[in-house]
Image (spheres, rainbow, N blue to C red):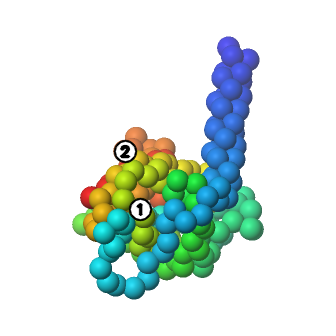
Amino acid sequence: MKRFTFILIAITIGTVLVSCSTASKEIVRMSHSEKTGVFSEVTSEGPVPANYADVVIRSSIKTPVAGYYPIVSKGSARGKEIYPFVVNIDGQAVEWQVKGQQHVLPEYVDGKTSHDPEAGVGMKYMLEKKVRLAAGSHKVFLGLPEESQFTMADVSVKGGGLYTLEFKPGYRYKTSPTRIPTFLKGIDEFEVLFK
């Protein structure tokens, strides 16, 4: 029975490592541009040309402060001043370096454990960039190299339009019976909202 348990644990750990490795390789691949001219960053206000649309890309992540996990490599961006977000649209890639701010939410509200997944002390990084795309359908990739997590979204935009594409983080659960998600355990998935 002990041998069976050991084999089961080894298989589980192996599966997790292979999954992380696969995600990391995909993020590295998607961080390199195969095309140019797919989108441009918009930094000024003004009318959108008739054959183009503007899309505001938003995402955020909260990480533990630097040093929270002593085993994490010193080169990690978790909890540091700057955090990388990789975006690739139809083969054109960009890595945006996002400045973080210390973020504190109470862990207990009215004497009870908070159910807010971002409760506690951490660093919060908020990405918000506006890009201009040709009207039509596009495939948008968002990757977090530090988390080995990524997601993709298919969007369709009409000329002259202004859209918002938001990637909301879904955090992993605590290992307690309460099953409350927490940023301290890292990202599990993204919820994609497009309007």
Residue in view at x 60 percent, y 67 percent = 95
Residue in view at x 68 percent, y 26 percent = 11
Q: Which three-letter amino acid code belongs to the residue tagged 1?
A: Ala
Q: Which three-letter amino acid code belongs to the residue tagged 2?
A: Thr
> Residue lying furthest top in this view?
1
Residue 14, numbered label: none
Assign a secondary structure to mark 2.
loop
* Gap between marks 1 and 2 measured at Cα: 47 Å
> Residue lying furthest front in this view?
51
* Image quarter (top left, top right, bottom left or bottom right) of the C terminus: bottom left
Specify whether 8 is left or right of 43.
Answer: right
Residue 178, numbered label: 2
In percent of width and height, residue 119 lies at 39, 65
Specify whether 117 is left or right of 147.
Answer: left
Assign a secondary structure to mark 1.
strand
In percent of width and height, residue 132 lies at 42, 69
Q: Earlier in the sequence, mark 1 or mark 2?
A: 1
In percent of width and height, residue 111 lies at 28, 64
Specify whether 148 is left or right of 155.
Answer: right
* Image quarter (top left, top right, bottom left or bottom right) of the N terminus: top right
Residue 148 or 116: which is nearer the viewer?
148
In percent of width and height, residue 166 lies at 37, 60
- Residue at which label 1 appears: 134
